[in-house]
Image (spheres, helix red, strand yellow):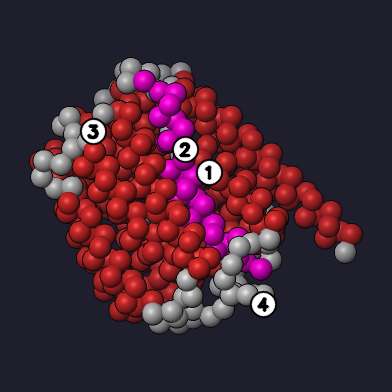
Amino acid sequence: MPLPQAAAALALGVVSLLMAGVLPALYGALGEEGRLHAAQFGLTATFEGLVMGLVTAAAGILLPPRHLKWIAAGACVALAACNLVSVGGAQGTSIMVARTAAGVPEGILLWITIGMIARTRVPERWAGIFFTVLTAGQMIYAFGFEWLLPRFHANGGFIALALGGLAGIAAAVFVAPSFAPLAGDEPNGMPPRRGLFAIFATLIYIAATATTGVYLEPLAVQAGLTADVANRAVSISLAAQIAGGLAATAMAGHVRYFTVFIASSAVMLAGWAVFLLHPPAWAFVTVNAAGGFVGILVSAFLVPMLIEADPSRKAAVLGGSTQVLAGALGPFATSFVVADNDVHSAITLGAVSLVIGLALIAGLHFTATRNNHAD
C-alpha cells in the first residue's frame, strides 16, 4: 500500500481515539461542574466504548472494505456533530447519549485503520507506528486541555474534539478506495475457534488495564493529591506511551510477544500496588507513566498473538474492536465496586483480571508452540 494511503488510514484511527487520551481530564471537568457523577464516569465510558467496539467488529465481519473515502468522510462529520451536541448545558443522561452515539463513527474510523494494519507483512510494526502517532495526537490534546479546561471548561474540550473530527476529512481524501482481501478463502466472516478464544483472552486482559484509567483523578484525590497531579500524570503518561510505541516499532520482528506480555504485566501490577500506598505526587506520576509505556507495548504485540492463534488474520481484524470493547467493559465492571469516597477496589479488580487474562494467553501460546513442534 502506498505510504500516503497508509498514513491516511492511521490518521483516521487517531481521530477515532482522541477522546480516550483526554477522557480523565474531560470527565473530571464534567464532574467538577456537576454535569456527571463519579458512578456515571464508568457508565459513560462503557457505553461509548461498547458501541465503538461493536461497530468496529460488525464492520470487520460484515462489510467489504470498499468506498472507504466516502465512508471515512461521513464518519468524521458525524463524529464532529456528536461532540458539538455535548456543548452547552448538557449533563447526565444527555451527555451519556451523545457519547454513546459518538461510538458509531469512531468505530467505523477504527475499522479502516485496523483493516489496513492487519493486511501488512509485519503488523506489529505498523501497530507500533499507529500507537506512536495516536499517542502523540492525544498528548497534544492533553496538554492543550490543561490550558483549555480551566478557561473554557468542558464545553471548550468538546469543541476541540469536534474540530479534530472535522480535520479527519482531510485524511479521508487520501485513504485507499478499498483494501485487498485477507488470507484465506473467505474475505469476511467469524474467526475459527482458536481465534475466538484469543479474542476472549484479549478482552479479559485489556479490560484489566482499563479498570483504573477512568478513575485516575479520584485515585489522586484520595491519595491526598490534587486534580492537577492527575492531569499532569495523564500528559506525562501519553509521552511515555509515545516512547512505548517507538519501542514496539523497533522491537517488532525481534522480540516474542509473550516475553513482552510477561514483563509488561509485572510492571502494571507493581504500579497498581504503589497506587494502593497513597504515594506522593512524583511516585504517582512515575508509575502511571510506566503503565502507559508497557500498555502500548502490549497493545501493539496483541496483533502477533492473534495471528499466531488464527493465521487467517480474521481475529487480528477484530483485535482493535476487542481492545475497545475491553476498554469499555473494564470501567463498566469497576463502576459496580467503587464509591465516590473510595475507588481503590478498581485496582483489585484490575489485578485479578490481568492475571486471568495472562493465564489464558499463556495457554494459547504454549498449545500453539506444541502444535508447531509436532508439525
Q: Where is mark 3, residue-wise? A: 36
Does label 2 or label 3 sit earlier along the sequence? 3
**In this rendering, the label closer to the viewer, 1 or 3:** 3
Q: Where is mark 2, residue-wise? A: 330
Tell me if residue 100 comes above or below residue 64 in the rendering.
above
Residue at x-position 66% and y-position 50%: 197
Position in image of residue 168 (x %, y %): 28, 67
Residue at x-position 65% and y-position 40%: 358
Q: Where is mark 1, residue-wise? A: 206
Q: Where is mark 4, residue-wise? A: 185
Tags 2 and 1 touching, CB below 8 Å: yes
Identify the secondary structure beneath mark 3.
loop
Number of marks present in the image shown: 4
Quarter-wise, where is residue 15 in the image? Answer: bottom left
* Mark 1 closeness class: few <14, some 14–19, many ≥20 residues within 10 Å: many
**In this rendering, the label closer to the viewer, 4 or 3:** 4
Does label 4 or label 1 sit earlier along the sequence? 4
Q: Can you say which quadrant of the picture contains the C terminus?
A: bottom right
Q: CA distance from mark 2 to mark 3?
A: 19 Å
Does label 4 or label 3 sit earlier along the sequence? 3
* Mark 2 closeness class: few <14, some 14–19, many ≥20 residues within 10 Å: many
